[in-house]
Image: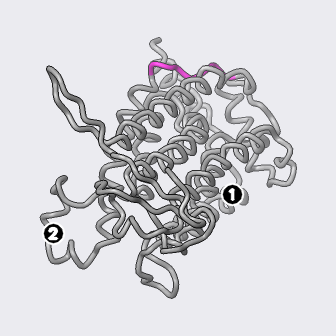
């Protein structure tokens, strides 16, 4: 890497060439993304192991984490593919069979995150508690996105609009680089989004620490009838803390808001005013979350009936190997 005026120039071979008994060509970005996912899983395991310390509840089972990770995969692939198809809708309308051809196109990160969260939460709900596992996944999700975005720099993907500012990045050499005209300096929007996601970890931890919770509606916190329902099942409740599952929503909204803003520097064509397809989709997701939280803060939870308390308690007993 050397300086050229005010532009950062990257000139290296993005492919690792392995020669010997087994020959293979592997992109450095692929290895970096795999490493980012592995580190994120380790972080999730760490928080799962500590999940019972501040709540008074039993810690989440680490052996469940593997099943949840496996459950995330189909949702991430399907959601990522469908969102990618929306990005290139005219092509897939003309070639619908290409949608199921893994050799063509790619996956949308937005679709992958939403789809993976849905299927992962479903599996977590079958095993133990979807809302508690979502909270564990909040920082891991942001870490995986942040490190994964940095990894795309190694393959020249995600470059934004052409620009010659102080931290613009341009690529030299033959690559192969994934962004069109990667040799022309441009906004490193992949770096912007990676930094924003990593900063979100600090925000999530600050929210989890509790100083902002006093400004939230009581029913958004672990109090009132919701706490009584949990206590009726014999489970301790950490009163005054954010209700389980809301921490993941904080992380998701943080990332989406940053992505919406950074996307104005992308090269995507607008479809609604100045907004691109992914910006419109992200705004819809944010609005759904906000409306859902508002409804939850107004709605009065229904106390568990005696029969329902027994049924839920019996189900938990069986899931725990009783």
Please identify, in this view, whether the residue under mark 2 or under mark 1 is nearer the observer: 2
Residue 36: in sight, yes or no?
yes
**N-term-proximal mark, 2 vs 1:** 2
Q: Which residue is the site of mark 1?
A: 299
Q: Residue 20 vs residue 76: left or right?
A: left
Residue contact between numbered discs 2 and 1, judged by CB atoms under 8 Å: no
Coordinates of residue 243 in the picture (x, y in percent): 70, 42
Provide the residue span drawn in magenta.
Answer: 57-63
Q: Is residue 285 above or below residue 132?
A: below
Label drawn at residue 123: none
Q: Residue at x 71, y 53 (%)?
A: 300
Coordinates of residue 219 in the picture (x, y in percent): 75, 50
Looking at the picture, tell me which residue is in the foreground, 289 or 109. 109
Q: Which residue is the site of mark 2?
A: 96
Q: Secondary structure at mark 2?
A: helix
Q: Residue at x 54, y 59 (%)?
A: 8
Coordinates of residue 222 in the picture (x, y in percent): 75, 40
Rounded to the nearest angstrom, the CA distance separating label 2 from label 1 is 43 Å
């Amino acid at each position: 890497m050397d300086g050229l005026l005010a532009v950062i120039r990257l000139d290296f071979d993005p492919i690792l060439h392995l020669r010997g008994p087994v020959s293979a060509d592997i992109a450095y970005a692929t290895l970096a993304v795999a490493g980012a996912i592995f580190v994120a899983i380790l972080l999730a395991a760490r928080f799962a192991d500590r999940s019972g310390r501040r709540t008074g509840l039993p810690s989440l089972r680490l052996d469940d984490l593997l099943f949840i990770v496996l459950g995330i995969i189909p949702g991430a692939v399907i959601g990522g593919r469908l969102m990618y198809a929306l990005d290139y809708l005219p092509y897939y309308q003309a070639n619908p069979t290409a949608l199921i051809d893994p050799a063509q196109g790619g996956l949308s990160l937005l679709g992958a995150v939403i789809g993976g969260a849905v299927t992962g939460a479903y599996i977590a709900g079958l095993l133990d508690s979807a809302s508690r596992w979502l909270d564990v996944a909040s920082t891991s999700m942001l870490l995986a996105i942040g490190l994964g975005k940095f990894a795309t720099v190694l393959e020249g993907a995600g470059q934004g609009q052409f620009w010659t500012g102080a931290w613009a990045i341009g690529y030299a050499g033959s690559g192969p680089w994934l962004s069109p005209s990667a040799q022309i300096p441009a906004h490193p929007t992949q770096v912007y989004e990676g930094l924003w996601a990593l900063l979100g970890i600090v925000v999530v931890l600050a929210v989890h620490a509790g100083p902002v919770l006093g400004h939230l509606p009581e029913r958004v916190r672990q109090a009132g009838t919701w706490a009584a329902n949990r206590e009726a099942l014999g489970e301790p409740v950490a009163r005054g803390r954010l209700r389980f599952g809301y921490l993941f929503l904080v992380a998701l909204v943080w990332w989406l808001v940053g992505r919406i803003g950074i996307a104005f520097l992308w090269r995507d064509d607008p479809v609604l005013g100045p907004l691109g397809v992914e910006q419109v989709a992200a705004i819809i997701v944010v609005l759904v979350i906000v409306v859902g939280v508002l409804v939850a803060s107004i709605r009065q939870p229904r106390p568990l009936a005696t029969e329902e308390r027994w049924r839920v308690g019996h189900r938990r007993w069986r899931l725990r190997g009783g």
